[in-house]
Amino acid sequence: MSDATHAAPADGRLDAAVRVAFGLTGGAAKRAIHSGKVSVHGRRVLDPGASVQAGDPLRLDMNAPRPARTEPLGVRLVYRDPHILVVDKPSGLLSAPLSTETEPTALDGALALCRGPRVAKVVHRLDKLTSGLMVFARSIVAARGLRTIIDEHRAKRVYFCVVQGIPRIPAATIVSDLMRDRGDGYRGSQDGLRQILAYDAPIPPAGDQGRQGVTRYRTVATSPERAALEVRIETGRTHQIRIHLSEIGHPVLGDQVYGRNSGAPRQALHAGRLTLPHPITGEELHFESPWPDDLRAVGPRGPGWLPASRGPKKR
């Protein structure tokens, strides 16, 4: 089967639809999507987690060319020098390999974007369904420097998201001890240890019951049933933003773990800004990534809140 077309059998994820429609394994379906072999309504889609509806025309063309090398696996180059690499990760792609996964990752894309030695070291991660900016180190020295910068809160990471409802407090800081299992099999804050502080409040001492998570949010636009938030994290715990916003009653649209069905095409969370000192030269670098096209329909109307893309800047 080199070229075939079938209708999506049900509403759901693209990789699940491809697996059923074309009789592939789950891994083969994801590889076909990542390598540009699958199109929906005639448009190539590289995100296995993209939403499809029953009846959508799916085409599998095993002879289709792979995505252009300038964006391997949909990973876009933002900045590159001999020491660091900054990329824009698409939703649906793991940041780096997990012990139980063999699917392609943003690390694979970063390695393909390297000039000279193909070296890229992971210093932080984004959730699989979160899109946006990631920085990789290209040497052991740079990796050590970047990890220190992140641990000392000198990297300013700003996310944009759309949430259900409008926060009663328009700007605040959420602090809690995050647990791997809050008692029901899901990650979350330990009962009674969550604090809601002023947006610019200092970080309080960490407790001893979990790993402290500090999330600062600011409402930047609203519509009757949802709000767009600018979110800054002081710590980078797993699922931190999604957990904190869900626990104050405003889950991220499209979050299938901590939220509820919202009709969003995918998780509406994007790492849009990154500012940090260069780990070798000390120069301050600033990077921006625009709000993704596949999420433009879910945000509040009007362009004022959407993060602009101005590219890298040295300050």
Image (cartoon, helix red, strand yellow):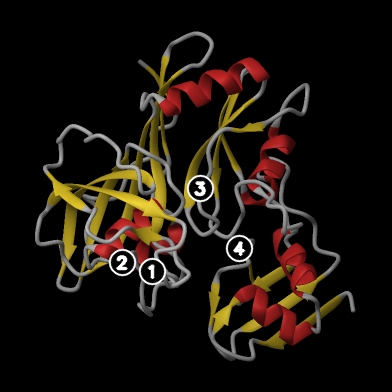
The mark that comes first in sequence, 1 or 2, is 2
Q: Secondary structure at mark 4?
A: loop
Q: How far apart, in angstroms, are the residues tagged by discs 2 and 4?
A: 22 Å
Residue 134 appears left or right of 212: right
Q: How far apart, in angstroms, are the residues tagged by discs 2 and 3?
A: 17 Å
- Residue type for callout 3: Leu
The residue that label 2 is drawn on is 251
Q: Is residue 141 above or below residue 252?
A: above
| Cβ atoms at labels 1 and 2 below 8 Å apart | yes
The residue that label 1 is drawn on is 258
Which class describes the residues within 10 Å of circle 1: few (<14), some (14-19), or many (20+)? many
Q: Quadrant of the N terminus?
A: bottom right
Q: Secondary structure at mark 2?
A: loop
Q: Quadrant of the C terminus?
A: top left
- Residue type for callout 2: Pro
Q: Position of residue 117 (x, y in %)?
A: 78, 23
> Which of these two is toward me, 230 or 169?
169
Residue 297 appears left or right of 202: right
The residue that label 3 is drawn on is 126
Q: Is residue 137 above or below residue 216?
A: above
Determine the residue positioned at 19% across, 73% down.
225
Q: Which mark is residue 47?
A: 4
The mark that comes first in sequence, 4 or 1, is 4
